[in-house]
Amino acid sequence: MIELSGVRKSFGSVEVLKGITASVEKSEVVCIIGPSGSGKSTILRCINGLESYDAGDILVEGARVDSHAPSIVAIRTQVSMVFQRFNLFPHRTAVENVVEGPIYVKNEPRTSALERGRALLAQVGLAEKADAYPAQLSGGQQQRVAIARALAMQPKAILFDEPTSALDPELVGDVLGVMRKLADDGMTMVVVTHEMAFARDVADRVLFIDGGVIVEQGAAKSVLDQPQHARTQDFLRRVLHPL
Amino acid sequence: MQNFLRDAAEFMPILLQGVWLTILVTIGSLILSTILGLLWALMRVSGLRALSGLSASLINVIRGIPIIVLLFYLYFVMPDFGIALTALQAAILGLGIAYSAYQAENFRAGIEAIDQGQVEAAQAIGMGWWLTMRRVVLPQAVRIVLPPYGNIMIMLLKDSSQASTITVAELALQGKLIASSTFKNTNVFTLVALMYLTMSIPLILLVRHFEKRANRR
């Protein structure tokens, strides 16, 4: 349902994506791993048009992503995003954050949206925090609200941009647990992550990106356990055995 | 002192008429400058080069002209082009335009202080530019903008005295008229100063309140 072919992107004179070709099927969980600065996040941001790309094509359910065209709004309502730094709206409560898109973008009636919003918060284990402001929540709780906010758009896919990188280690598990449940329920997910255990257990496929190209890709277990490429081997050794 | 109190009692009714006009000019131009300033600021951050360029030039032109010249222009020059304004209208319009430049720069600073991640989160749920502004950016920018906004109110209150130059009989002009007909310069202008101060104090307290609130988060 998401297809990238020959996607290139430069920031000034630095080319960060040098021809990315990949696809994500419905209900598939794809993890993107790689060193920082390799272009992982840029791929995600191009898929929902937060970033424009210079060459190639990105199709979401057959519709071409163009960050400057009005059609981008329709694509964004189908492909939600969860950010590394949560980016909750600090002036609104948890449930208001969740229903903001449904009410103001999709014009859903307030009462039904709120009902659904509270149910979504319950689904991520935060039923009792619905009326709390983001500042009153821990990082892990904020990220789960952000996931509920993404779900509230009833998206066909969710993009996760290093969703646990800004969390204290003991809070990572709660967020990954929610994500695993989503994967089990058949949500299409593209996850940029450094959590190799999550990638191995939950992902169907893993893409290893370095220097703006896909160096290696395949079934999660085979890429992570028997990497073929020297750069992949080197990266995994550093991540898995930092000492 | 007794002398002063007696004069105060005598001149107060006339001066209060001036106070009324001072308040009218201040509130009128505050509303106008807020609307125009918000418009300039939104044009400036629109991301459209033509609009932001136009806004930047407008702000620079407005900033570069003294308020008193702007007032003269509106009151004495515009009739030559068939647009005759009353002194009060010209004062409100002139001060409103003059202050819109400062309002715009304040609003722009507030808008640009909002984390880019907020804008991206809004876009990611499909919000367009205006919805992002209205629901996400502006409500957060208000907090940042309010303390300087309070200061602008105080400056505007004092600068409303410039309306006296185009015959608006506000507080400063009433004072000057009384002083020149009674020669009681000291008492009259002390009284005028005290009355401006009295009007400023609530605004100063308001600014302090805004600052405390802004610092809380």
Image (spheres, grey):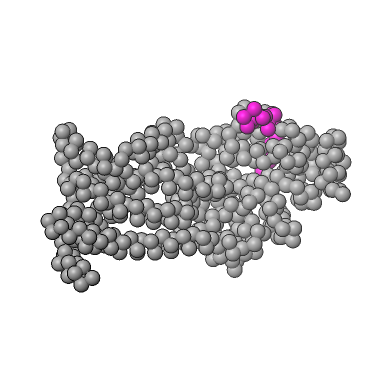
Farthest residue toward the bottom?
A: B2
> Which image quadrant: the N terminus of chain B?
bottom left
Is residue B137 shown left or right of residue B184?
right
Q: Can residue A221 be seen in this snapshot? A: no
User: Residue shown at 15%/40% (left/top)?
Assistant: B84
Q: Is residue A15 magenta?
A: yes
User: Which of the pair B74/A116 is nearer the observer?
Assistant: B74
Q: Establish if A43 lies above or below B195.
A: above
User: Which of the pair B68/A43 is nearer the observer?
Assistant: B68
Position of residue B28 measured from the top left corner of the image (x, y, whole percent) = 26, 52
- Which region is colored magenta? A8-26
Farthest residue toward the left?
A: B181
| Main SS class of the magenta portion in the image | strand
Number of numbered markers:
0
User: Residue shown at 51%/34% (left/top)?
Assistant: A68
Is residue A44 shown left or right of residue A196?
left
Position of residue A223 measured from the top left corner of the image (x, y, whole percent) = 82, 41
Q: Can residue B211 be seen in this snapshot? A: yes
Q: Establish if A168 lies above or below B81.
A: below
Q: Establish if B167 lies above or below B181.
A: above
Position of residue B203 measured from the top left corner of the image (x, y, whole percent) = 36, 61
User: Residue shown at 62%/27% (left/top)?
Assistant: A55
Q: Is residue A14 magenta?
A: yes
Q: Establish if A125 lies above or below A165.
A: below
Residue A54, located in which quarter of the rendered image?
Answer: top right
User: Which of the pair A151/A192 is nearer the observer?
Assistant: A192
